[in-house]
Amino acid sequence: MPEHRHFIHHKPFGYLCQFVCELPKKKLVGSLFDFPEGTMAIGRLDEQSEGLLLLTTDGQVSEHIRSRHIEKEYYAQVDGLITDEAVEQLKNGVEIGIRDVKYRTMPCRVLRLENDPGFAARTRKIRDDRHGPTSWVSIILTEGKYRQVRKMTAAAGFPTLRLVRVRIGNILLSNLKAGEVKEVDAFELSANIIG
């Protein structure tokens, strides 16, 4: 039986976390690297989101990483200067909609970032400064509902303009450039996930 393979990837803005798509003109993560057959994304980032994406040919690894035992950290650039009240709301859980059903998010860790994290400019500009200030917040979750971070910040009154996943477990996005892929071995992957 062949050895499983594992990859760390910086998913760029505008790409789907898929290898096949019936929609024309969609950009797919699978086109960025010569991934082996059977590779799957572990968890997803929507088309507008960027950042750390793990891929593997091992379904068991995928199940473990997607579990509630593994933290996922996101940096969200939000519309406006996020308030202490909104940060507290996010920490305690907010009500969002999941497929037309109301859902209260689990308590999580939230921190306002004092400085811009310095990501490279996105391929599509966020907006002009004349539309008012923005701010950045770190949100650390152990759950992963569809578009959860975007829905959470909107529920707190600060819609997300840019979303970058920067950490899964102990694996960091670090200086991996958008579109870059790094192959890692199973030991390195599991050691970095669990810590």
Image (tube, helix red, strand yellow):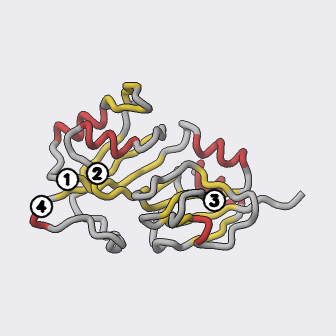
Measuring 30% from the left and 31% from the top, which residue is drawn there? 94
Tell me if mark 2 has few (under 14), some (14-19) or many (20+) residues whose alpha carbon lies within 10 angstroms of its own: many
Q: How far apart are marks 4 and 3 (CA)?
A: 37 Å
Q: Position of residue 184 (x, y in %)?
A: 66, 66
Residue in view at x 46 percent, y 53 percent: 46
Residue 20's disc number: 3
Q: In this view, does 167 lie above or below 95?
A: below
22 lies left or right of 84: right
- The percent position of residue 33, horizontal first and vertical second, equals 63, 73
Verify CB contact (< 8 Å) between mark 2 and mark 1: yes
* Nearer to me, 73 or 77: 77
Element assignment for label 2 = strand
- Residue holding disc 2: 160
- Give the residue type at disc 4: His
Q: Mark 1 belongs to which amino acid?
A: Asp
Question: Upstream in the sequence, badge 1 or badge 4?
Answer: 1
Q: Is residue 87 above or below residue 168?
A: above
Compare residues 53 and 132 and report the one nearer the observer. Answer: 132
Query: Three-letter amino acid code at disc 2?
Result: Thr
Q: Which mark is residue 131?
A: 4
Location of residue 185 in the rendering, given as x and y in whole percent from the top left corner? 71, 64
Q: How far apart are marks 2 and 3 (CA)?
A: 28 Å
**How far apart are the two marked residues, 4 and 2, measured between alpha carbons?**
14 Å
User: Is the residue marked by circle 4 packed among few (<14), some (14-19), or many (20+) residues within 10 Å?
Assistant: few
- Identify which residue, 112 or 59, lies in the foreground: 59
Q: Mark 1 points at which residue?
A: 79
Residue at the extreme right: 1
Mark 4 or mark 3: which comes first in sequence?
3
**Residue under the point 65% across and 47% down:** 62
